Amino acid sequence: MLRLEGVSKYYAAPDRAIAVLDNVTLSVGNGEFCALVGPSGSGKSTLLNLIGLLDQPSSGTLSIDGESVAGCSAHQSARLRNRLIGFVFQSFQLLPRLTAWQNVALPLQYRGVPRQAQREAAEAMLARVGLADRTSHFPGQLSGGQSQRVAIARALVGAPRLLLADEPTGSLDSTTAQDVMALLAGLNAELGVTIVMVTHDRDLAAACPRQIALRDGRILVGDAGTC
Amino acid sequence: MLIALPRIEGRLGDTLAEAWSNLRAQGRRSALALLGIMIGTASIIAMLNGAHMAQRESLKLFAKLGVDMLQIQAAPAGDRPAILSRAAIDALPRTDPDVIEAVPLAGGRAPARAGGKTADIATLAAPPALATLASLRLAAGRHPASVEDCALSAVLGDGAARALSAPAAAIAPGSKVLIGGYGYTVVGVLAPVTPETLDPIDYNMGALVPLGCAQRIIPGGGPTGMLVRLRPGADTQVASERITARFATPDAKLTVLDAQSILRTMQEQKAVHSRMLIGIGAVSLLVGGIGVMNVMLMSVMERQREIGLRAATGATPTDIRLLFLVEAVLLTIAGGAIGSALGAAIAWAIARSSGWDFDLAPWTLALGPAVASGMGLVFGLYPAITASRLNPIEALRAD
């Protein structure tokens, strides 16, 4: 499903290049639910951005669903993101002027789906995350948990193969966080979507079938790929 | 290509709807950005229509005679009267390639008297062809026939007839009028005439008499001028020089009134005005365009997270560029439309205050929004490119 081979990422500093990711090799199987853990500065977010095609590795190869995606142009990356990847962010990232269903429909809009079909698909996905009665609400009218559910619906409405979640429960209280985790686990089981989730919450990470631990840009455990 | 088309169309519709709602959300700031575009468009539209109406008005000055007309007058250069050869004038349409019609004239002034009333009137001795050439319409009676070339029959202008009418004895066909000591029979009275630049006399306060025996009222007895109709498209400058050369004598100083050069002079005077207004319009448009660019750049900075999020969900750099470009163009088109309406209103006010007929040149109404959308494209491009080049990771992290 997802394969990284010798991936490194350097940032230029005034005197030398700083390696944020150092020769990472990793493979994630179809339908896996992985937690990506590590202290801050360990390279979790950078790794997630590389997998999410929001950034380019300095060296190494990356393939998603058998497609090599290293060296894609910004345009190609955008098309691939639209087709293959859904994102969930800590801060939800809902557009305040759009209603819940319009937010969910964004990926379909960039796929050129007709407006009526966009709405139907978005409402169906909102129903799936338990928000059938909130489709025309604006983000300002939704609680944190509801907002994150809308964001999850948006990430999955285009039926991507891979869901990338960056601290998805970081802005939520523990009860709501549990609900969101349960929702993600359920969607993972029902839809078979592969999930890679960055978290620093040990309990949440422990609840995932697989943990990948990073430290100083290297993988400590979890690269065996057992699932 | 054909397969990709519906996708782009659907997306453009979405983009338009979103751009519109974003502009509305920005409210007052959008409105302020419009101001410059509005003033610029308004002044250009007002100026163009002002010029358009002025042109129509100046053409009206030649409505009766047309613009392919020369009036040539001979003034005495010495002691002897300046007389032009009537035969040579009558022969002009055959001898000059640009002349279609030439009518000899002899103008003067003479005291007129009828039934105790007197008036000082302009006299014009001319052949019957003048009535057709100058489209002189009659209120009563008839024009002199060509067989009356030396008859004592006269056609009076509307004002002259009224000035000579006594309460009990109104001037009508059949009345007798004494002009310059000769008794003339009135055969017709003209309908009121709107004075025009090329009229040899004020027809309203004049009398038309046959040219054949003009010596009765005109010293010298021959024509002292002519009206010449040129072939449409003829070079009036060249033709008038050729004709004056042909008729030049030591006794006569020839002056030419040329409809087209009169029009040209009028338009040159207006061109100075027009250039000034176009300058003001262009500067306003430039300032307005920079204002639009500024608003769009601020909008890009404020909406970085939105841009990052859209990029993450699959918006290509082209999609992002299009979103901001469409917003900029919508903004300027709105300004252009309001400006056009404003410009039309100013043109109406100009017409009103100048006593002109209000008339809009249709193409100028399309020009406003067209120019404005061009401004939107030009000044929206830089913000749109800036937006499309944002790094999605940093954009998502912005606050």
Image (spheres, rainbow, N blue to C red):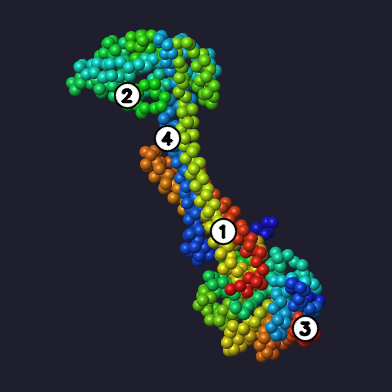
Q: Residue at x 49, y 62 (%)?
A: B29
Q: Secondary structure at mark 3?
A: strand
Residue A203 position, x and y percent, is 66, 90
- Between marks 1 and 4, how big is the CA–CA gap? 41 Å
Inter-mark Cα distance, 3 to 1: 47 Å
In x, y percent, where is residue A222? 77, 86
Q: Which residue is mark 4?
A: B57
Residue plotted at (35% across, 16% down): B108
Q: Are marks 3 and 1 on the same chain?
A: no
Cα separation between marks 2 and 3: 107 Å
**Nearer-the-camera pick, B79 or B40:** B79
Q: Answer yes or no: do the residues labelled 1 and 4 have beta carbons within 8 Å?
A: no
Residue holding disc 1? B293
Q: Considering only order in the chain, which callout, 4 or 2, is on the residue closer to the N terminus?
A: 4
Label 3 amino acid?
Ile
Q: Are marks 3 and 4 on the same chain?
A: no
Total numbered badges shown on the rendered structure:
4
Chain where mark 3 sits: A
The residue lying at 24 percent from left, 16 percent from top is B113
Task: Please state the chain letter of the residue tagged with numbered disc 4 in the rendered image.
Answer: B
SS state under label 4: helix
| Residue B159 higher or lower than A33, as above or below | above
Camera-nearest label, 1 or 2: 1
Distance (Cα) linking label 2 and label 4: 21 Å
Q: Chain of mark 2?
A: B
The amino acid type of the residue labelled 4 equals Glu
Quarter of the image with the C terminus of chain B in it: bottom right
Q: Which mark is residue B204?
A: 2
State yes or no: discs 3 and 4 in contact (Cβ < 8 Å): no
Q: Which residue is mark 3?
A: A219
